[in-house]
Image (cartoon, coloured by chain):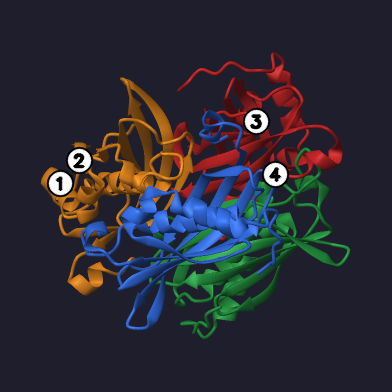
Chain colours: A orange, B blue, C green, D red
Amino acid sequence: MTTFEPRNPDFRAAATRLFDGQPVMRTLGISLARLAPGEAELAMDYAAGFTQQNGFVHAGIITAGLDNACGVAAFTLMPRQADILTVEFKTNLLAPARGEGFVFRAEVVKPGRTLTFCEAKAFARQDGATTLVATMTATLVALVRRDAAQASSPA
Amino acid sequence: MTTFEPRNPDFRAAATRLFDGQPVMRTLGISLARLAPGEAELAMDYAAGFTQQNGFVHAGIITAGLDNACGVAAFTLMPRQADILTVEFKTNLLAPARGEGFVFRAEVVKPGRTLTFCEAKAFARQDGATTLVATMTATLVALVRRDAAQASSPA
Amino acid sequence: MTTFEPRNPDFRAAATRLFDGQPVMRTLGISLARLAPGEAELAMDYAAGFTQQNGFVHAGIITAGLDNACGVAAFTLMPRQADILTVEFKTNLLAPARGEGFVFRAEVVKPGRTLTFCEAKAFARQDGATTLVATMTATLVALVRRDAAQASSPA
Amino acid sequence: MTTFEPRNPDFRAAATRLFDGQPVMRTLGISLARLAPGEAELAMDYAAGFTQQNGFVHAGIITAGLDNACGVAAFTLMPRQADILTVEFKTNLLAPARGEGFVFRAEVVKPGRTLTFCEAKAFARQDGATTLVATMTATLVALVRRDAAQASSPA
């Protein structure tokens, strides 16, 4: 893994604020577990309310965790005044998402002034063992925040 | 769009049962709006609890709707005893997911004995207008249901 | 399909020049068959030199046609001084790429100042029939050409 | 990286035969550089005939190398009588593909009886330095070879 130099010395506070500002993370019971320049790890407990027909956590919920891990990881390398939006991601589902809890680990592969490319992995925890259940590759875009209207346009 | 011949004459009841059997759909407030052979449409009202930092519905939630629309559309063409799992999907986010409500429309592009390929689009509704906010391409796999353990293995 | 208004009145000449400037297109025997604002169609004859182990045209070659169709389609909507690079694409392979010839059809789904989102389909032609063999979704980025060095950086 | 146990003791000969059986690899000047259970590395020299408008190797050609590296890596873990086809891949283009030569490295992330998931990276070599230029995630399907007609159906 590459070591990255954050452009915003307050990247930790900024990324935490980005995470805390998202109501969906509280609703899904996802918490911010670890932060480093270009890296983020989120954690989520199993909840029956987010499962599909076989009792596994739904792929969309796993994707929410993966995407947010990518967003926070990318945000740690962005300048102070940036906002961030996801351009696209692909999720490959490798094993059923069953377990007591889940971890979402993302890292920046290629940061850029406009576009940042990230990879993330989702793991299920059960009885002390962890299983890779899904992977994501994602492109994110930095938006220079001028006003609210501008910040809301993805490209 | 191609016209498909369902292999299961009870496809409508089977697909509805698949949808109803997913607790996550109720939690997210997503309902089944329309079914046809190889097609599905889901609907979701805006809910502040599922938004990101700008008040838009989070990409993971939009993805949950798109993925489930693909799953239900694919399932309408599968034989009676099949279970279904998603192999992979890619989501492109084209506009902020803001609006009173959202619609997820999926159609099968290529059905297969094992693998089915689907495309889906997410639209936001606001004041009578609809905006395309995201697209998905997805691969799904049919599993012949022998017992619960088997049904839970994606490939 | 949406109707698009090109920003460059000479879009046809510009897109043709973009296509003609790519040696790979001549090497692969791909030609520009049709152009419209936000749309492009390319054609390729079967050539044994581009096949894989079963005599089908290799997925990478099909992808070259799809990607270039997307690039040309996106370029028709870009301003005069832009250069273009592909950010990412996903290809789904739906049927073996066998036939006398192939057609690659791309259209812009969402143009943008920086990012453009396109979809494309590859068809095989054989004895007057056409078969869908692959689909692509792609994100492309417009680069304002200041000098050669700049134009070569993707983001 | 996980260590994999090949099911075919002659996996090395089988994977080499798979690679050698593809005319496109010779046409593109791609060679098989390294093989291990669940891993493959290919190499390609720069050739002006495969470049786009800025003199970089075209994304489709890079994709051909990445896809084939994935195919060969996946094939090393398949049983003796299998054939293999690509279901889908996504390529993210991170830097211009310029250099004296290119290396394509793939590894199996999750093997399966039917579906195998791989990741690959493309590097450019120039003056002794290497640069990551693209990544791929890919799903491949094993086909049990019964007869030629069957082997040609992707799913």
SS at mark 3?
A: helix
**Which one is in front in this view, the residue at disc 2 or the one at disc 1?**
2
Residue drawn at (61%, 30%), measured in percent from left and top? D74
First reached walking from the N terminus: tag 3 or tag 4? 3
A61 on left or right of B35: left
Q: Which residue occupies 36% across, 50% down?
A: B24
Task: Work out how far the residue at label 3 is from the one at label 4, CA to CA, in angstroms.
Answer: 19 Å
Q: Nearer the viewer, residue D119 or B135?
A: B135
Q: How many marks?
A: 4
Same-subunit check for callouts 2 and 3: no
Q: Quadrant of residue C143?
A: bottom left
Q: Is residue D18 left or right of residue B33?
A: right
Q: Decide: marks 3, 4 in contact (CB < 8 A)?
A: no
Residue that appears at 44% across and 74% down: C81
Measured from the top left, where is residue B10 in percent x and y?
A: 63, 56
In the rendered image, residue B43, in percent from the top left (x then y), is placed at: 41, 66
Q: Looking at the picture, which amino acid does disc 4 mark?
A: Ala
The one nearer the camera, C147 or A109, is A109
Q: Which residue is mark 3?
A: D72
Q: Which numbered marker is on residue D155?
A: 4
Q: CA distance from mark 4 to mark 2?
A: 40 Å
Tell me if residue B107 comes above or below residue D100 in the rendering: below
Instruction: Name the residue carrying label 2.
Output: A32
